[in-house]
Image (cartoon, grey):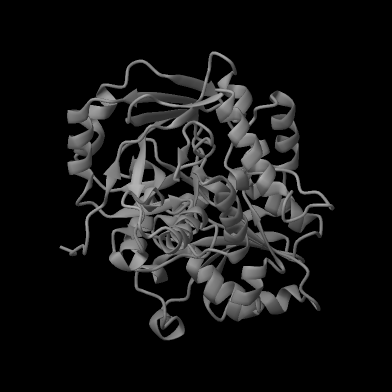
Amino acid sequence: MREWCDMARLRAFSAYRYDLSRVRAGDVVTQPYDKITPEMWQRYLAASPYNLVRVILGEKHDQDSAADNVYTRAAGYLNRWIEQGLLRPDPEPGVYAYTQTFTSPETHERCTRRGFIALGGLEEYESRVVFRHEQTLSGPKLDRQALLRATHTHFGQIFMLYSDPSQQVERELLERAQNPVLEVTDEYGTLHRLYRETDAGVMERLRQHLAPLPLIIADGHHRYETALQWRRERNGQAPQRADHPWDWVMMTFVNLDAPGLVVLPTHRLVHGLTAWDGPATRARLGEYFAIEDAGVSVQEAGAWERLRPRLAEAGATGPTLAVALAGHPRLSWLRPKPGLDLAALLPEALPEQRQLDVVLLHQLGLNLALGVTPEMVRQERHLRYVKDGAEALQSVAAGAGQAAFLLNPIPPQRVRDVALAGGVMPQKSTDFFPKLLTGLTMYRGD
């Protein structure tokens, strides 16, 4: 059994929450900041003058200055709402059971995901308590760091996974979750319910059960690393303080062995490569992948609906992805060529990583075969991430894309195995659905 260097830390807290006698929850909470489209942003602004989008994703102005900018305005909104009593801290510390009932976009089944919100202790990755599974980019972290410095507040939760097949960790808390303090249906039809628990015994048993378990970040890598950086800054600025409130961040803890955990794929669309040659590209892919006709035409109506169940079936036997190439009328399967020495081709990848479709696609397909280098991927040059497989295929059919690579979702257990082995995946390898709403609870770390 793997040895962990430290123990996970969990703490109850008095969350700041909207006074729901003065505002409707549906008018003020939002999707995570990086999932808010311009259309959603406008809708949030129109819903209420107190919608949290004004704080987490404010409008930048040409005349912004050091004294008046998107971050100082965010702090101004937040402080006024607290002064006005629109945002209030709960009277005593607690933890918050959180359920999400939704329809899976993949299977169309009705599901419920259950978890709980509490403060989790920030740990450097080297301590082997908290594990990442995806790469991060510097740009989003700079933006979130500026907002955190201005507001000293966490508005959304880090989505954290733990593995407990017995479901002992969360059982007592979720059994007691009977009367929600908040209930709201979001724009995707997901019903969110929040329950508050203040019993000291329940919270202590929850803390003890969770402490020995490693934690894997499912969503929120950028915000977690932002919180780590802010902790370093605050420790340097106020080392005499004994309480160190910046040592904690809001987390939603979800058991990856419990029902309701849905992961969606994110497909890759290649575009804008100069001197595109479809047959030559197919030949270069053939150096690393066995290519087989998938029995579906790129142009036919409902191509993705026909392909998706076949892709899932094919992926059950080993790494498999589908590709649509501009100039080639039919979709093809791509599987690693028999006898391919993946250890030699990918010497820096762990064995757990070499079994992932998305890693093979990025390292062999994009980098070696198509020349879309890791640096191009980081800059999102010649590569676009697409949630809808039908949209990716339509882009190739219409000539807007040169190649669409269609992927199966990565099972949560694979995410765990790669993370605990110390590996990471390319950015946007996983899409946990639904997202955690922002503004249900807030933590002021000052």
Tally of numbered tags: 0
- In depth, the one of 9 and 325 nearer the eye is 9
Expressed as whole percent of the image width and height from the top left, the position of residue 353 reads 40, 69
Side (left or right) of 68 relative to 15: right
Q: Quadrant of residue 239?
A: bottom left
Q: Is residue 232 visible?
A: yes
Q: Residue at x 64, y 30 (%)?
A: 51
Quadrant of the frame with the N terminus: bottom left
As drawn, 236 above or below 188: below
Residue extending furthest toward the front: 240
Q: Quadrant of residue 113?
A: top left
Q: Residue at x 41, y 76 (%)?
A: 349
Side (left or right) of 254 relative to 278: left
As drawn, 329 above or below 197: below
Expressed as whole percent of the image width and height from the top left, the position of residue 94 reads 32, 30
Q: Is residue 36 visible?
A: no
Q: Residue at x 75, y 44 (%)?
A: 59
Expressed as whole percent of the image width and height from the top left, the position of residue 20 reads 53, 17
Residue extending furthest toward the bottom: 344
Expressed as whole percent of the image width and height from the top left, the position of residue 439 reads 53, 33
- In depth, the one of 323 and 51 nearer the eye is 51
Residue extending furthest toward the top: 21
- In depth, the one of 379 and 94 nearer the eye is 94
